[in-house]
Amino acid sequence: MLRILIHFEIFIKLALILLLLWGSYRTIFKKDRAVGLVLYLGIVIIVDSFFNTGIYIPGLEKGSIRYSEVCAFFLILNNPSKNLTRRSHVFFILLLFLYFVFFFYAGLRGDTLKLGIFEFRRYIVPQIVAFLVAYRGFQNKEDYRRFLFYLMTLIIIIALFTFWDVFFDRWLLKSDTLNEKTYWGGRRHGRFGSFFLNPNYMGAFAVLFFPIIFIQALTEKTNWKRIYCWLGVLALVFALIETQSRGPLLSFCISLIVFILIPSRNYSLFKKVGSLVLLLILLYAFMPGFFEHSIQRFSMLEAEANEETRSRKTVWIYTLKVIADSPYFGIGLGEIKYIKSMIQAGFVEEYSIWPLDNPHNSYLQIAVYSGIPALVIFILLNILLTKKSVSKILTEKEQWTSFYLIGFVAGMIGFLTSLITDMHMFVPSIVSSYWICFGIVFSLISIETERSHI
């Protein structure tokens, strides 16, 4: 009976076009930041990354203006005013500035200057832009709610494309990126990554956003909106399960533990656990056997851990050697520079095979490209943001900001855990999502105490 849905493909494509036009109108002419931020994220994931397209600049062999940057221009132009004179805020901005300065210097030391600047443009500029569009947050509580509600639409669209690929083995939209190993490397093993192509990227996205959209589903008051939000939650979990990605699945468990353990006034520990049990029951109703399906790749862990050829384990060992040789400013930005450094360190000589094109560990990748100080700054930024968020949650339990902070913080901690086994901090479609969450949390901890509740 599912085959009947294929006849609705044309309507789905038409709906996507209408959503794009409506979102652009709301962002540009109505200055609607809640819609605009979701539109920006959707353009980064679908247009910039999946379609791999942009506005061509004549005369340049490489590079163009990304469509997301056009959207970001209007968002930044209409940023709400915020008081950033508090010392803690200035310190945050200073740390961020230093972090990106380290990467700019790393870009100047790429394999060639031209290639290094291109790599900085490709990997780092999207991170800066994503933070700039989000760190001022929204004008009021209702805009935060609206942002999360519209985010459900983007999540449902992402999950819909996973659904189409799983059950119909076809794509609603075509792109040359579907011919790349990033997609078919996982697809041939029955793993699905939707617009992200790589299942690990899709998994990291799900880990990052699940706690906050789950909270939105729990707190939504209007009946039809509550149903829509629960549909979004189920859709995101479905997409996560179909990735069969071990790192994100483990990180997902960690984010749930954090979500449950952080105390909140509106939802007790019992109520949080009860809500998750309800979700589990719904999953078993719609996806019998989902648990066994999602964890089947864990049986391969022991065999992979004992591999003495190219693997995460051997690559990490040699990456640490490279970092030890250039601890302060790294080797410079770019995969070509990294591969050459690994060869010089003796990887090919020992294993008779080329190393992976990156460490498959974002923390090591930050350190090897731009140095240990940059990694320390990154970790410090996240520790400080988490500390301030938890402090605000515990001291202002009655405020509407606290429950949102629980969701974002739980998702970010899960995401930061997933970085141990992958290069998400250097994948624009994923890292932009992270910096948007980072910016929104920054805006939430900056909001002065109000006497309004969820």
Image (cartoon, rainbow, N blue to C red):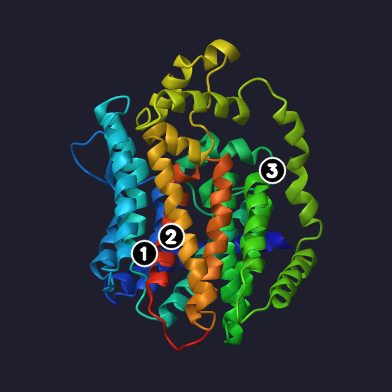
The amino acid beneath tag 2 is Phe
**SS assignment at label 1:** helix
Label placed on residue 419: none
**Of pointers 3 and 1, the one earlier in the residue sequence:** 1
Residue 68 visible in the displayed image: no
Question: Which one is earlier in the sequence, the residue at label 2 or at label 1?
Answer: 1
* Left or right: where 289 falls relative to 426: right
The image position of residue 311, as x and y in percent, is 62, 27
Q: Sequence order check: which comes first, mark 2 or mark 3?
A: 3
Q: CA distance from mark 3 to mark 1?
A: 35 Å
Outermost bottom residue? 451
Q: How far from the left and from the top, in percent, is residue 73?
A: 26, 61
User: Which-is-in-front pick, marks 2 and 3?
Assistant: 2
Identify the image quadrant of residue 263: bottom right
Residue of label 1: 134
Looking at this view, is 23 or 217 the one in front? Answer: 217
Mark 3 lies on residue: 190
**What amino acid is labelled 3 in the image?**
Gly
Q: Could you tell me which residue is drawn at 59 percent across and 37 percent down? A: 184
